[in-house]
Structures are given as C-alpha cells and as structure tokens.
Image (cartoon, rainbow, N blue to C red):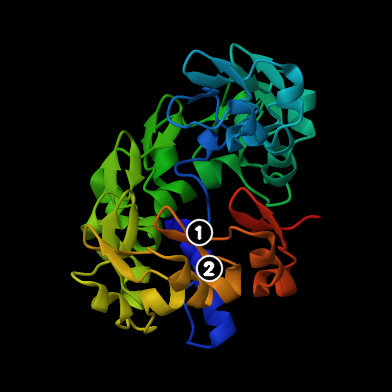
Amino acid sequence: MFKELLVRLVRLIAAFGVGCLLIFSMYSGCGDGDDAAPRAGRSSHSASNIPCHERTECARHGLCGTQGSQCVADRAEHCLLSQGCRLFGTCAVSEGACVASTNAMCLSSGVCQDTGRCSAIDGACVFGAATDAACLTARGASKISPCTTFGRCVADQGQCVASGVTDCARSGVCAQYGACSAKDKRCVAGEEAHCRASANCAKMGACTLRHNECILADSDDCAQTGLCKQIGLCAFTEGACGFAAAGKDECSQRRGVQQITPCESFGLCAVKEGVCVANSDTACAKSRDCIISGRCANVGEECVPSKPEDCAQSLACKQEGRCVLQQGRCVSGS
C-alpha cells in the first residue's frame, strides 16, 4: 500500500494543485536487487481461496500448478508466458520454480537489456565476468556498473561478486539501502546504523535491521519519512505507514505540509486500530482518488477500482491510458 500510495499522491497533487510533493525512488528491492526475481518459486495456496492458475503469482512467476498447500511452477509453458520470463529470464521450470537455465534466456530478458545481468548462473541472470576489470564496466541501458552500484567488484566463477566490506561500503546500495556489509558474496545490511543513515530510511522508512535487510518496522520508522512530514502518513500498520487517528473526525483533518485530508483525498473516513481506513463505497466514490485513479469502491478497507467504468472514467485513463480493470488495478491495455 505504501509504495503505491506514493504514486497516487503524485497524481492527486498534480491534478488538484496542492503543492509540490517530494517524489521518492520507486526502486522495488533492497540490497543489490538479486531477489527481484523470485527463485524459491513457491507461494502458499492455503492462504487464499483463489485457485493457483487465477492468482497473480501465475501471471508474474509461472506458479500456476498446485502441490499440496502451495502454488508451484509445474509446466514449462507457464514459465515461458510469465512476466518473470520477460523481465528476469526465468523461462524454464525446475523443481517447482521458474529459473533462468541458459544465457539465451537472460539475453532476451529485460534485466539484461536494462542492467546487464545477462549470464545464467544457479538459475538466475547475473553480472557475468571473466576478470575483475569487467566488473567495473557500465552495462545495459541504465549504464550500471556491478562494482560501483552493487559492490560486486571481483570476478569469481564467471560472475561479479562482493569480496568484502570495502567493496560494499563504497557502493551505491550502501548509501541508498544500507547494504554496506558483505555476506555470501553480496552486499547486505549488517548494522542498523547503516540502515538509519541510508537514503531509503528517509524516503521509505526502511530504518530497522531485520535478517540482513533494512525494513519499515514501526511508527518510529514512519516518522523518519518525507511522507510523514509532507502529508502526515506517520502511523505503522500492517507493514505500511498510515494516517493516525483516535476518532473518525480526525480523518477529516488536514495533515502535514501538503495539508492532505485522508477522507477527502483517499476515502479513508473511518478508524480501525488507530488509523484511517475505508469503510464504505460512498466515501470512496466521493474521494479525489476515485477521480484520479478510479479507486471508487471499498474492498478490504481500502478504496480500489471495482468496475470497468471506474477505470474508464478516471484521469489515469484520460491522461495515461490506464483504462482497463485488471486484478483490482487500472492498467494500460485493451
């Protein structure tokens, strides 16, 4: 909810002129991004009544088959048709997961074209290298250097790896995500002080060290973010930052420098466990977020698009072409 809300806030502010919002990095991962492509290849089936082949994990990661209580990859065509194949080269099936089994799979992937991860090793597309000098070379459309950006400065068994704390400490992922320590040949977060000194702490609230990763863990972390200061998104709830409120009237009060109102802006007009939540279709339909993003119906205490016309009538459709309702979101397409 937190990252998606950033995007929605930018659209809302652009449309209604309530001032300049700090626009933060939307980088989807932490550390050096090796986990951007899931390699475990399994998700719990029992946690949802939706069949595996109808869930987002099927389209995204090829996890369309059922094995006991888990969704798994069990057919090669599911991997080939998945977003993971196009983006991360994980086009082959192996032990219930979609993996990158050949360099050819990596070479045709988005992660190769964008960042230069073009060699298939251990089921993933990685920075291939025969010499240390190759790890200093800028790669892909984004001109990423494995060493400068990710602390992977040494060639080892055909790929760039992090050889020690020195490589990690001077890398981009240390400054951005607090991944300043070396472990298992990659840069990870090893000290909470590094998390709190990172740019992602100030931007996204990822200030607490857990399992070698800097994460958003509590309201103290939320308080460190620009969104807390700018719009009052300061209370931790269910893994995200929300709008704190002792009573529903407080959800109609303006927050932060930008004077955002949870109820008016996002349809969050009721209170549950100390934060503003959605509790009616009416509140969602009256919100600015309905006009901007088509989020006009209450589902799970959040405003979301529920009918094709919600997307079709939104500014997101008219200005960005996101006119199609798909899995609770307005997306581009026909």
Closer-to-camera residue (205/193): 205
Residue to which mark 2 is pinned: 8
Q: Secondary structure at mark 2?
A: helix
Q: Which mark is residue 4?
A: 1
Which residue shows up at 28% across the image and 38% down it? 210
Query: Mark 1 and mark 2 in contact (Cβ < 8 Å)?
Result: yes
Q: Give the tally of numbered discs.
A: 2
Residue 190: x percent and y percent?
Answer: 30, 38
Is 95 placed above or below 271 here? above
Which residue shows up at 25% across the image and 78% down it? 249
Q: Residues within 10 Å of mark 2 (few under 14, many from 20)?
A: some
Q: Secondary structure at mark 1?
A: helix
Q: Which mark is residue 171?
A: none
Q: Amino acid at mark 2?
A: Arg
Q: Is residue 21 toward the left or the right of residue 97 in the image?
A: left
Residue 90: x percent and y percent?
Answer: 68, 27
Closer-to-camera residue (38/295): 295
Is 232 placed above or below 202 here? below
In the rendered image, which quarter is residue 135 located in?
A: top right
Q: Is residue 83 toward the left or the right of residue 57 in the image?
A: right
Q: Amino acid at mark 1?
A: Glu
